[in-house]
Image (spheres, rainbow, N blue to C red):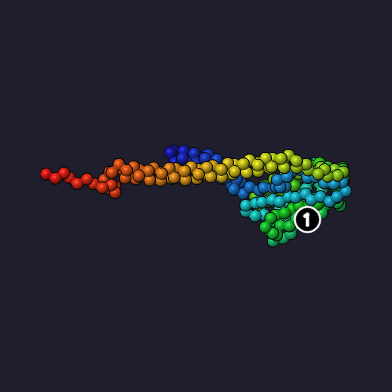
Amino acid sequence: MAADGSSARLCRSWPAAALLGLQLFSMAVTLEVSVGKNYLVMALNGSEVQLPCIFTTCIGFKNLDFTWYYNSTDLIYHGMIQNKASEPTMLYADSRVRFIGTTTGKENNISISMFVDFDDAGKYTCHVRNPKEMNAEHNATIILKVVQELVPVDNTLTRIIVGTVGGLVGLLVLILVIKKIILLILKKSQEKKKECLVSSSGIDNTENGLAGSKAKQKAPPKA
């Protein structure tokens, strides 16, 4: 009976251990997709704009599937990558979309470019699914803003901040230099005072006829 009880407890604990193992495995092979640090892209009406996207995976990929969506619903590009040694294969592409990435270099680049007008403003989502990672999926989104003209960036505030910081640093350096000069002057002044005290002490000893002076010593009285 005891053996049967141990077997039953082992069977009950096995699913929990298997689940924990699967969780640890999924944490170790996380798929990540990135569109860079700047999620907002500005483009001129009628110009060609690049929409960047790269993906990373710890254990590599096989028959990886990637797609680009406009406003989360409209498919504008669909591709598949067999492995690291092969370039992506296009499965579908909007007539205005061009694939500009590569996956045979250091980065797994699946970026696209397209000519845009005002109607193309919105969200563009890069989605990746990797069957080698238990069909792990991940995506990242870019917001595209289409304008008539690009407004020059006003760097006045930046220049003011940089100038103020530079002025404070210069003032601090000047204060340190002045402080060093003052300390050097005080040190020399103290050294001169010590020399004067030593020399004056020697003169006083000579005038008072102390021991070691050049004053003549009186002869002792004769008996």
Nearest to the observer: residue 56 or residue 29: 56
Most distant residue in the front direction: 222
Image location of residue 144, percent across then percent down? 80, 43
Residue occupying the point 37% across, 43% down: 200
Foreground residue among 7 and 94: 94
Instruction: Count up the numbered dots.
Output: 1
Q: Look at the numbered disc 1 and give the secondary structure of its residue.
A: loop
- For image coordinates 62% across by 52% down, the residue present is 58
The three-letter code of the residue at mark 1 reads: Ile
Quadrant that contains the N terminus? top left
Front-lying residue, 158 or 195: 195
Q: Is residue 17 visible?
A: no
- Residue closest to the far left: 223
Residue corresponding to mark 1: 100
Q: Looking at the image, which residue is at 43% across and 38% down?
A: 2
193 displayed left or right of 162? left
Residue 28 percent location from the top left of the image = 59, 48
The residue drawn where x is 81% and y is 50% is 49
Neighbourhood count class around disc 1 (C-alpha, 10 Å): few under 14, some 14–19, many 20 upward: few
Quarter of the C terminus within the rendering: top left
Percent x, y for residue 129?
Answer: 70, 49
Is residue 27 shown to the viewer in this render? yes
Residue 172 falls in image quadrant: top right
Q: Is residue 161 left or right of residue 193?
A: right
Give x and y (percent) for residue 167.
Answer: 65, 42
Relative side of 164 to 114, left or right: left
Q: Residue furthest bottom?
A: 85
